[in-house]
């Protein structure tokens, strides 16, 4: 099914990404990343989430109205296997907790995607365990009309250096991205206003705003970076960031 990847991806590279083992923590934004990765040829995916699909997910996540009320991992697995029934899609239908996270990360993975909500310290613990096992971690961020990805590995700085508490952590990430973009003169004006407006309401327990555009942009960025890491192309790591906007 990957015949049209020719010229961009060699047969040897196609085989390599097929067997590259990826774990995706969180099936919200992770659901869009999973499909983009599978369509490129990444066929060994483990998806973890204990959440169910809700109507409010449909503006940006990879689900339909028929999926509402179903566990995200089950709905996503079904969708992915309809694309490629030969893919190895492993599901863990549980929220990660301090008690089970080590068990669920005990398989040898080559790469991790961290799209876990910052409603606890679990995203930090996910990073810590992965880095201790020499598994690079991609942190994608939906920025509405744009998207960003941060890569953490054992030689990079850790995200926890931005802020040690999880509450409002997405805002700290976005503010760091602003600072990095200012260095390159690639800062889109809309992002300054959105981050400023959100910073005024984030203390009220309001989730960050997200658009479908940001989801698809971040999925393509993550998939490209997954490919680069798999075939040993050099990538930027935190505190440097990747950013794309229309």
Image (cartoon, helix red, strand yellow):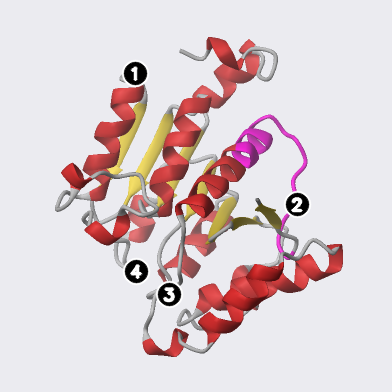
Q: Which mark is residue 236?
A: 2
Write the residue at 72% across / 56% down: 237
Mark 3 is surrounded, within 10 Å at the Cα level, by few (under 14), some (14 to 19) or many (20 or more) other residues, namely some
- Of labels 3 and 2, earlier in sequence is 3
Q: Which residue is mark 3?
A: 121
Q: CA distance from mark 4 to mark 1?
A: 33 Å
Element under label 3? loop
Q: From the top left corner, tell me how far across and down residue 192 is, in percent.
A: 67, 75
Write the residue at 41% across / 42% down: 107
Q: Which residue is mark 1?
A: 86
Disc 3 and disc 2 in contact, CB within 8 angstroms: no
- Of labels 4 and 1, earlier in sequence is 1
Disc 3 and disc 4 in contact, CB within 8 angstroms: no
Q: Which mark is residue 98?
A: 4
Question: Is residue 191 found left or right of 64 in the rendered image?
Answer: right
Which mark is nearer the camera, 3 or 4? 3
Question: Is residue 1 found left or right of 171 in the rendered image?
Answer: left
């Amino acid at each position: 099914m990957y015949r049209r990847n020719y010229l961009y991806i060699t047969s040897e590279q196609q085989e390599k990404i097929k067997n590259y083992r990826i774990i995706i923590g969180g099936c919200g934004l992770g659901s869009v990343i999973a499909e983009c990765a599978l369509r490129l040829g990444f066929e060994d995916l483990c998806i973890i989430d204990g959440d169910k699909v809700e109507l409010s997910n449909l503006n940006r996540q990879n689900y339909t109205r028929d999926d509402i009320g179903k566990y995200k991992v089950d709905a996503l697995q079904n969708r992915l296997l309809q694309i490629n029934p030969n893919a190895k899609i492993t599901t863990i239908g549980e929220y990660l907790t301090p008690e089970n996270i080590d068990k669920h990360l005990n398989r040898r993975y080559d790469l991790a995607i961290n799209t876990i909500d910052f409603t606890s310290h679990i995203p930090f613990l996910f990073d810590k365990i992965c880095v201790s096992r020499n598994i690079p971690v991609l942190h994608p961020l939906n920025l509405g009309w744009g998207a960003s990805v941060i890569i953490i590995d054992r030689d990079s700085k850790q995200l926890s250096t931005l802020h040690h508490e999880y509450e409002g952590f997405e805002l700290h990430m976005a503010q760091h991205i602003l600072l990095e973009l200012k260095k390159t003169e690639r800062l889109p004006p809309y992002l300054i206003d959105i981050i400023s407006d959100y910073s005024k309401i984030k203390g009220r327990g309001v989730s960050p705003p997200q658009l479908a555009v940001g989801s698809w942009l971040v999925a393509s960025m993550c998939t490209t970076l997954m490919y680069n890491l798999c075939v040993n192309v050099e990538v930027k790591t935190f505190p440097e960031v990747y950013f794309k906007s229309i």
